[in-house]
Image (cartoon, grey):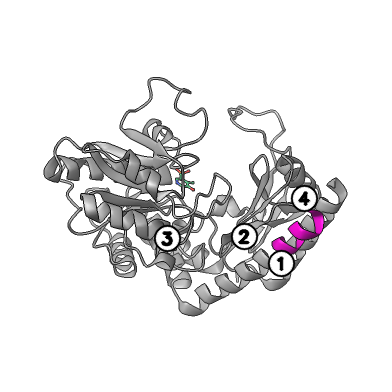
Amino acid sequence: MIAAPKPLEAPASSSALMAITSRPECVMVRGKGSYLWDSDGRQYLDFIQGWAVNALGHCPAELVSALSRQANLLISPSPALHNAPQLELADRLAEASGLAAVHFANSGAEANEAAVKLARKWGQLHKPGATQIITTTGGFHGRTLAMMAASGKPGWESMFPPAVPGFVKVPFGDADAVAAARHDDTLAIMVEPIQGEAGVVVPPDDYLPALRALADRHGLLLILDEVQTGIGRTGALFAHQHACVMPDIMTLGKGLGGGVPISALLASDAVSCFAFGDQGGTYNGNPLMTATAVAVLDTVNRPAFLANVRQRGAQMASGLGDLSQHHGHLGARGQGLLQALHLRAPRAADVAAACFERGLLINAAQPDIVRLMPSLKVKEAEVDAALLTLGEVLARLG
Ligand SMILES: *Cc1c(COP(=O)(O)O)cnc(C)c1O
């Protein structure tokens, strides 16, 4: 083991950084496993983990060694040349998913953009005139202009006009609403298996199977955005595996890189129709990121690892359920290690702030929803500790 390097001095609080969100004053300098430390040496139990990104926790040995090994070999040959980790990662993802073709990008939004481009291309070839994609209210697909239009966050359509056209919105979890919104110009259905940013909204069990049946009946593409739910987060490698449903297109991000920026677009052979010139990107598939993602997959895609995610998830779900009942809130929801507590009042920001004061990081996903998304390697005692702190805060805030 190499000792952790000494962190840089924290900069003064005034900074040239654009203020795009409210952030606490402290500066994070170091992380290990489920813990994060700021420049004053304060320790935080981290149940946000880079926004459900650090699948293996902070600075896990597997990632550090994959990154440093690859950094010493080759960092960026060129997107127009093959590199070994990119080929290996593509093959592994194809084998694990049953989707034959893989393209890499750098963020969830970028992978989703690519998914929409691929669907539109497929439509031009096989379903001329069909361009509309049905998406869902509350859905979140990223922050590019097209993905803001695809997302169903309240107010997003009108934020940066003109909005990108081509998306029709229906309520999440309601397959009949999708059927009713479908017309001859419908090309695809694009949903998250569980809505993450909307506050961990779990659809009925028959939702994905019903969407699959609808897509098959009308020759539509089923696009699953697994940027948040993929790579073991819900206790299966991909969340759609719980429902035994195959998408035509799937996107991955967040946990795929375990903390480094990489995302992926996967498609069935029949749908994989990009021609030369249709898609690309300077950093796409660069070996530093793909070698890291191979190390993540190596760890996550094992039955014992995923079984542990389900066990810790069950522990968290039952603990949150108990807290909810004890303090009169509206219940726990989620799957695996993507869990939320539904508060009876819009006090999620207060709860998250009070937890932060006590050294626990959780996320106020909605005004009345707190979301927990720890490392997939989280330990039993760490889940207990988080629940204990959350319980103290709920008791204090009433
Ligand atoms: C986070 C997220 C995205 C966007 O990913 P970025 O890497 O921030 O662009 C897209 N879809 C879902 C479901 C997400 O949770």
Q: Looking at the image, do the residues carrying marks 1 and 2 touch, with CB atoms under 8 Å apart?
A: yes
Q: Looking at the image, do the residues carrying marks 2 and 3 touch, with CB atoms under 8 Å apart?
A: no
> What range is drawn magenta here?
320-328
Name the side, left or right, on which 305 lies relative to 297: right
Say whether disc 1 or disc 3 marks the residue closer to the N-terminus. 3
Q: CA distance from mark 1 to mark 3?
A: 34 Å
Q: According to the image, label 1 marks what residue?
A: 382
Magenta region includes residue 194? no
**Mark 4 is on which residue type?**
Cys
- Quarter of the figure with the N terminus: bottom right
Q: According to the image, label 2 marks what residue?
A: 374
Residue depicted at 26% across the width and 50% down the height: 221
Q: CA distance from mark 4 to mark 2?
A: 15 Å
Q: Main secondary structure of the magenta part?
A: helix
Say whether disc 2 or disc 3 marks the residue closer to the N-terminus. 3
Category of crowding for the residue at label 4, using alpha-carbon neighbours closer than 10 angstroms: few (below 14), some (14–19), many (at least 20)? many
Q: Nearer the viewer, mark 2 or mark 3?
A: 3
Residue 210, given in percent of the width and then of the height, sits at 36, 57
Q: According to the image, label 4 marks what residue?
A: 355
| Element marked by disc 3 | loop
Residue 74 seen by the camera = no
Magenta region includes residue 327? yes
Q: CA distance from mark 2 to mark 3?
A: 28 Å
Q: CA distance from mark 1 to mark 2?
A: 9 Å
Q: CA distance from mark 4 to mark 1?
A: 14 Å
Give residue 206's mark. 3
**Mark 2 is on which residue type?**
Pro
Res 144 → quadrant? top left
